[in-house]
Amino acid sequence: MLSLLLSARYVIGDFFMEYLQMIYLPDEDKIISFTPKIVDGTFSESIRIFSASFISKMFIWTGIIILFLALIHIPIPNNICDRVKLQTLELLLRLSNEYLGNLVENLSGPKVRNIFTRFWLALPFYIFSTKYPDWLKIETIYIAGVKCRTYIPSKNYKKTDGAIIYIHGGGFCSLSPKCFDSMLINLITNLGCFVISIDYDWAPEYVYPRQVNQIEDVVTEFCESSYANFDIDPTSIIIMGDSAGGNLSTVTTQRCKRKGKNYFKAQVLIYPVTSTLDFSTPSFQQYYNEYPNTAILNPFILTRWYLLYLGIPATSTNIKKCLNNQHLEEDFINDINIKESLNHDHLPSIFTNPDIYKKPVNNIKPCPELAPLYTKFAKSSDFCPIIAEDMENLPEALIITCGYDILRDEGILYAKKLSRKGVPVDWKHYPLAYHGIMNMPYSEQRTQIIEDIKKFYGIKGFNIWQRLFTNFLFSIPLRKPKWLIIKNIKIGNINCRLYIPKNNKRKYDGCIIFAHGGGWCIMKTHFCDFSLYNIIKNLGTILISVDYSLSPEKRFGTAIDEIEKVVTTIYDNYYKELNINRNKISLMGESAGGNLCLAVALRLSKFSDKIPIKCLILPYPVTGVFHFLLPSYQYYNDNFKNSGMLSPDNMARWILLYLGLDDIKNGVEIIKQNGHISKKIRENPIFKESFNAKKLINFVENVKYIENSNNFSPPDLELANKMEKYLLNSEFSPLMCCKEKLSFLPPTFILTSNYDILRDEGILFNNKLKDAGVSVKLKNYKNSIHGSMTIPLSVVANEMSKDIVNFIQNIS
C-alpha cells in the first residue's frame, strides 16, 4: 500500500506536472496556474494553457480518488475465488451498507438500518435483470396463504417428476425469491425439475416463529395436495435452502419428521445457519484474522439479523455481547449434549491448527439481561437445529460449506452430528468459495457447486425414473389365486407381504422369508407375486416377503437390519401366530435380495444354536459386487450391450447409491473398469483366490475372457479409498468372507442364468462354499437371463420354481 501511494505521488506530483510544464510552458519563468484563464498571445497558446490546466486538475483529482480508495481499501484473501468481482462488490457493499448503514443506524436505529440493508442487497438483482429462457414458466401463486414463486420447465426440458422446495437466504430479514432467479434457472437447466420458492415474511416486521410456521404450512399443503397440480411425484421432493434458508429447511424437515410426515427424499443445505450459539468457532476467528472488517458476511450483520429475527433489541451493545459469547446462560451452554454438538474437536484438524486457532476461554460471564432472552429461543431446535437429539431417520442430506464463510463450522458440525445419528450425509466443502457465492453470476465455482448438486440429485433422478418405469411394467393387476391369502402386515415394525395358502393347500409347516431384487434401489414386494405363486402352491408353504427400505433413502446396513429383525421376530414369537415350525425357516433372495439374505445368514450363523436357518435359496445372487471384468461381464459387452438386460452401468449405479457414494465424479465409468478396487485389495490373497477367473473355464464362451479379466485400470484414489472398507466387508461382498465363517452357513441352492453379468460371481461363490464344507447345489440355466423368475409364463421361471421346491423338500 505504501508503494502504491508513493508511486501515485511521484506520477501525479512530479512527473506529469513537469511534463506538462515542459510541453505547454517551456519558458522557465512561467509558473502554472490551476485556474483557467485567457492569456495574451495567440489563440493556440490560450488553448495550450487551458488544456494544461484541465489535464492537471484531472490528474490531481485522480490522485485524490486513488488516495481515498487506498485509505478505505481492505484486501480480501488472494486465493478466494471470483476475486476481482468480489473485491469490487465488497467495496460497494461496505461503502453503502456498512459505512452509510452505520450512520443510518446511529440516526434511526437498527430496524431502519435493516430496511436500508434490504435496499442495497436487492439492488443488483433488479439493475442486472436475469435473462429468462422461453422454456421456463415463472408464476406467483399462493399456497396456505403464503406467496410462492414457481418455476415450471416445459415438457421438452423436464427431466424428472421430482420437485425442489427452495427456501432463500438473507438472514431472515432480507432478499426474496426473485433475487435467486439466476441461480435457480441455472439449477433447473441442469436438473430439469420443477421448483417452488417460498416468499416467507421478513423479520423484524414478523418475528420468529412466524417464518417457520409459514414454511411448514406451505410444505404440508404442497406435499399432501398441491403437488398434483404440477404432475409431481410426491415421493421425489427435495427441500433446499441457503444460509438462513438452510436453517428453515432443516428445521422444517425435523418438524415434519417428528409429526411422522416423511415428505422429503433428501435435504440440500447450502452454507446453512444451524447453530447461532457459538461466535468463537475457527471460521469466526478466520474472519477476524484474514479478512476483517470486510462486507463478506461479517459477524456484526449476522448477529444483528439473529436479534431482529428473535425480536430482541439489536443494539450495538447486544451485538458485541453475542460476539463475546455472553448471550447464553451457563446451565444451557454447559449441558453435555450442547457441548458435544458444538465441540470444535469434531472439525477437521486443518481448521483447529494452533497456529491459526485459539481455544475459546470458558470463564466468560453471561450478560444478565441478554442471556435469559436469547437462551429461551436457543433451547428450541426450531431455531437452533443442531441441538436436536431425535435426528434418526431424517432424510439424506447434502451439506455445502465454503472456506471463507463464518458459517462454515456450524455447517460442518451439523453434518457430523447427522452422521453420528445415522443420517446419510454428503458433505461437500469448497475451500476457496465464500458465503453468498450462489448469487454470483458467471462464477466458475458456482458452476461446480451446481454440478455437484446435479450429481447428488442426478443419479437419484435416474433411479426415480427407473422406479417409475418398473412401477409401470408391474402395474397390470394379476388375478390373485383363490387358494391364497395375501396380506400387507408389519413384523417387528417392518412392512412385509404375507402369503398364506388356505387350509387345504398348506402342506409345509415351515416358512420362506423372501427378499426381492432390484439392485437395493428399485422394486417392491408385490412385483414378485407371480414369481412366488408356483413355489407357494407346490410347496404349500407360508411365505413372507420383506418390504425393506430402498437406497438411496437408506444406505448399506439398513435393509440387512430390517430383514434380520423380521427373522428374529418370527423366530422369537410370531411363529406361534402363524403356526410355523421355527426350525424350518428358510431364507430366499434374488439378485440384490440374495446379497441381503446372505448378509443376514452370516450374521445369524454366529448364533446358529439360537436361530437355525433351514436353508438358503439364491436365484442369480449378488455375491462379489465389485469385479466388473469377469467373463460374464465381457460377454455382455460383446453381445448384449444396450439391451434391456441387467447392465454393468445399472449395477455400478446401484452400488454407488447403496453405499452413498453417488457423488463421485464418473463413478460408474470407474467401477466398470475396476478402478474402484484399491491396491490393497488387489494384493489381498482372499481376493485373488475368490475371484480367480480360471475356475470358470467350464462356463466361459471364449478363453480370452479369462485372460482379460485381470486388465484392471489403475485405482481411482478417491473412490477406491472410500469403497475399500465396504469391499472388505463380507456383509457387502460375501465372496470376500473367510472360509471359516462361511462354514456355518446352512445348505444352499444357487441358481445362475447363463446370460447374466452376475453368473460368474454366483459360480465362484458356489466353489467357495464347497471349499468351506457347506452343502451347496449349483444349477446354471442355459437359456436364461437375469430376472427370469419374474417373467410371466416363462419356461425357465417354472423350471426354477420346481427346482427350488424340490431342494427344500429334499432337505426337510
Image (spheres, grey):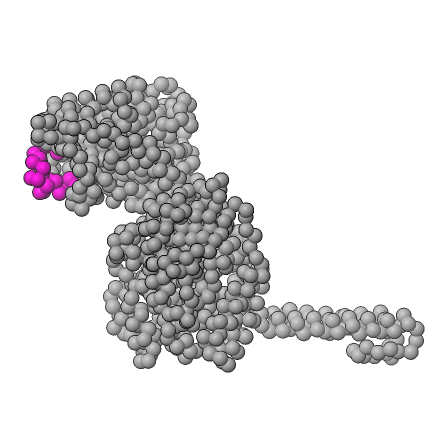
Q: Residue at x 16, y 28 (%)?
A: 482
Q: Residue at x 25, y 68 (%)?
A: 335
**Res 564 quadrant in image:** top left
- Judge whether residue 377 is colored magenta: no
Q: Percent x, y for residue 114?
A: 47, 72
| Image quarter of the N terminus | bottom right
Position of residue 538 in the picture relative to residue 427 (left or right): left
Q: Percent x, y for residue 220?
A: 33, 55
Question: In the rendered image of this protein, does residue 442 appear above or below residue 281?
Answer: above
Count numbered badges in the picture: 0
Residue sitting nearer the eye, 740 or 806:
806
Q: Is residue 519 visible?
A: no
Tell me where the magenta segment starts and ends, as one range: 566-585
- Judge whether residue 582 is colored magenta: yes
**Res 73 quadrant in image:** bottom right
Position of residue 751 in the picture relative to residue 642 (left or right): left
**Res 413 quadrant in image:** bottom left
Q: Percent x, y for residue 344?
A: 34, 63
